[in-house]
Amino acid sequence: MFIDFARVRVKGGAGGAGAVAFRRESGVPRGGPAGGNGGRGGDVILFANAQLSTLLDYSYRENYSAGRAGHGEGSNKTGADGADLELPAPLGTVVKDADTGDRLGELLEPGDRLVVARGGRGGRGNASYATSTHQTPREWEPGEWGEERRIELELKLIADVGLVGEPNAGKSTFLSAVSAARPKIADYPFTTLKPNLGVVGLSDGRSMVIADIPGIIEGAAEGKGLGTQFLRHIERTRTLALMVPSDSEDPQDTYELLRSELLSHDAALEQIPHCLVITKADLRPEDDREWDVDAPEAWGSFVVSSVSGEGLGDFLQGLWARVEEEKKRERVDLPDPFPELEEWRP
């Protein structure tokens, strides 16, 4: 089952209390205070696991707590620290505070770690209160409680290309034709009920990841059909492919509808470059292949047939070139980590 959203409660471990104790050793008169500090509570940590592709595990359990720390002991012994609780999450997971909406972080690369609830600090024992004028303190501190909060986990698949189209626009057929992915394909609307990823291999060891999301219909932004809940999975893509089938009654209207629903979901999607793709070209005869679609903002237009293979090569090469161009732009836009050294550069 594909689950891309979860809400859970996390709690850091409580810190241990400080101890009140005094040395009692033969030959050591007035040994003084010897109460140790409490240990530190464990943290709740999310880490990125490339083997996961869904948040399904978090739909079975709601509360997660890290280990409680040990109390301080005599002989200046510090209590044991609480055990951290490490929770795996798939790449592309965004973490937010469920109550405030604040973004806590995201997990993008394997091994990324994010502390979502810190453990409490351990309390001081009476040995920490000893001074030259206060040599037999009996003060001590309780340990602090760990952080507790509700968090939202939102999975946004990481892909190079996002396929956008109405139901039965040929997105799944295209993905199955160019990759090893095997999404469900049928001749009725909303065959695709969850996003699918496919890795497309090109010559010279080149590859790119393509995401197929469920179909969009008019009014999807208001919740019609499957809504636009799955559009979060194309927010990280480097380019979009707006797919209009050749048997559409009004290709221009279909294209504009897709653009409108994308922007209704999130205006930031306008910043992602897109191309126009006329699919199912095999349904139209050779002498009837004129589609008057005005798409001035698209970086390219393609006509393909996933059944006959027509146009697929040119389309994939075009996607690859655009993805590489966006990657270069991302590298150029990265902030200079050493701006103070600019004057030394040639």
Image: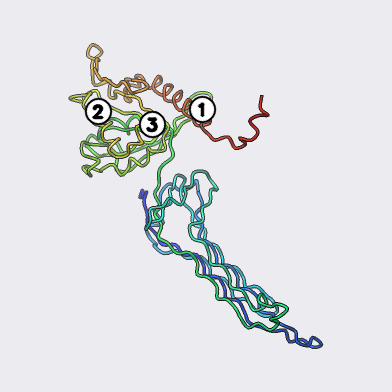
Look at 55% across and 48% down and name the residue there. Answer: 111
Determine which quarter of the picture holds residue 79.
bottom right
Q: What is the three-letter code of the residue carrying label 2?
A: Glu
Q: Position of residue 169 (x, y in %)?
A: 27, 30
Determine which quarter of the picture holds residue 71.
bottom right
In front of the other: 24 or 309: 24
In the picture, the disc for residue 256 is 2
Q: Residue furthest right?
A: 27
Could you say whether the residue bearing mark 1 is in a helix, strand or loop? helix
Mark with earlier residue (2, 1): 2
Could you say whether the residue bearing mark 3 is in a helix, strand or loop? loop
Q: What is the three-letter code of the residue carrying label 3?
A: Ile
Look at 44% across and 39% down and name the residue there. Answer: 158
Q: Residues within 10 Å of mark 1 (few under 14, many from 20)?
A: few
Q: Residue furthest front?
A: 133
CA separation in Å, label 2 and label 1: 29 Å
